[in-house]
Image: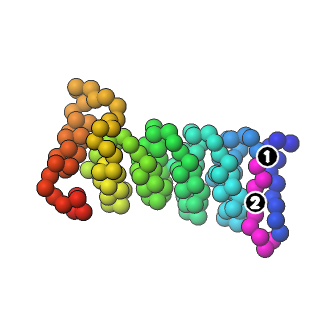
Amino acid sequence: ENQKLEQGGDRGSSLELRAKVEDQALLARVALETGEGSFNISCAAARHLKDQALLAKVAVEAFGFREGVGLLAVERLTNQVLLAKVATAANLWAVRQVAVQELSDQALLARMAVEEVDYNIREVACHRLFEIPRESTCLPLSADDANTRLYVDILQMIRASSIPAEHR
C-alpha cells in the first residue's frame, strides 16, 4: 500500500504523482525509466527523492527528454562528493553545468577549468573559481600531490594577474 503509485488528473491536465511512496530506489527507477509520455511522473518522482546517492544516480544517468529530471535531481544535491561525480560523469552537459556551479572544491574546479573537453564546462568552472572566497579551502593538500598543487598555483596566478576579470 505504501508503494502504490497513483496517477491523478484527467487527460487534459498534467499527470501528477501522489507521493505515498517511501521506497527511494523505486522513485529513482520511476524517474529514469518511465516513458516519454509520462514525463511529469518522472519529474514528480525526482522531486520526492531525498536520498543523495540516488539523486546523483538520476542526475548522472538522465538523458534525452529526461534532461529536466536530471536538472531537478542535481539541484537537490548538497553532498559535495556526489556533486563532483555528477560534474564529471553526467550524460547531459546542462546537468554537469549545474553541478559545477555548486562545487566548492577548488582543486577539482581548477582541474576542470584546464582539462575539461567541453568548453562550456571549462568556462563555468573558471567562473566558479572566482566566486569562491580565497580563504575557503578544499581538502588539505599532501606534499606529494604535485598535480593538485599545480592547479592551485595556476588558480592563484590567474587571480593575481593583470588580466581583466571579464577575460579570465
Circle 2 residues within 10 Å: few <14, some 14–19, many ≥20:
some
Magenta-drawn segment? 11-19
- Do the CB atoms of the residues marked 2 and 1 lie less than 8 Å apart? no
SS for dot 2:
strand
- Where's the C terminus, which quadrant? bottom left
Q: Residue 21 location in percent, x, y?
A: 76, 44
- Reading the image, the residue beneath label 1 is 20
In the rendered structure, the answer to whether residue 81 lies left or right of residue 142 reads right
Q: Distance between the residues labelled 2 and 1?
A: 12 Å
**Can see residue 85?**
no
In the foreground, 87 or 161: 161
- Where's the N terminus, which quadrant? top right
Quarter where residue 39 is shown: bottom right
The number of numbered badges drawn on the structure is 2
Mark identifier at residue 16: 2
Q: Which residue lies furthest to the left in this view?
A: 162
In the rendered structure, the answer to whether residue 2 lies left or right of residue 131 reads right
**Which residue is at a point 60% across and 42% down the rendered structure image?**
54
The amino acid sitting under disc 2 is Glu
Predominant SS along the magenta part: loop
The amino acid sitting under disc 1 is Lys
Q: Residue 123 location in percent, x, y?
A: 32, 58
Instruction: Give above or below for 8 relative to 144.
Output: below
Q: Residue 101 location in percent, x, y?
A: 41, 52
**Display colour scheme:** rainbow
Circle 1 residues within 10 Å: few <14, some 14–19, many ≥20:
few
